[in-house]
Amino acid sequence: MARICAITGRRPVKGSIINRKGQTKKSGGIGTHVTSITKRKFRPNLQRIRIKMPNGGTKRVWVSVKAIKGGLVQKV
């Protein structure tokens, strides 16, 4: 399954987890240091729903919850 919204085109985006260690300068330490950076993905919240097509038919597609809440699709 391609994790892409059929309406808005939302798709997974790349990011990273940054692990820091040490006591912050604000609380009396010498500052935090980056110990590791790990790749990760931010995935959209997709739901498979039946929607009304403009020609009157119905179709099951993957749609982001943001599109559903925003009223961009007509649920059946």
Image: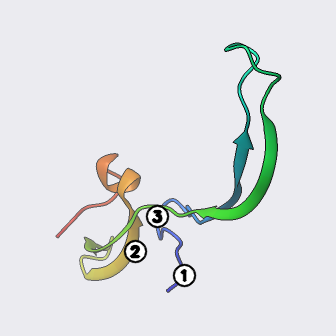
Q: Which residue is mark 3?
A: 7
Mark 1 and mark 2 in contact (Cβ < 8 Å)? yes
Q: Residue at x 71, y 55 (%)?
A: 16
Q: Secondary structure at mark 3?
A: loop
Does residue 46 appear left or right of residue 38 in this picture? left
The residue nearer to you, when weighing 67 against 40, is 40
The image quadrant where one finds the C terminus is bottom left
Residue 26 vs residue 76, the one in the foreground: 26
> What residue type is disc 2 on?
Trp
Residue to which mark 1 is pinned: 2
For the point 72% across and 40% down, which residue is it?
Answer: 21
Instruction: Specify the label residue 62 is tagged with.
Output: 2
Which quadrant of the view contains residue 65?
Answer: bottom left
Image: 34 above or below 27: below
* Residue 4 % position (x, y): 53, 72
Residue under the image location 72 percent in, 42 percent down: 20
Question: Around disc 2, counting alpha carbons within 10 Å, would you say few (fewer than 14), some (14 to 19), or many (20 or more)?
Answer: some
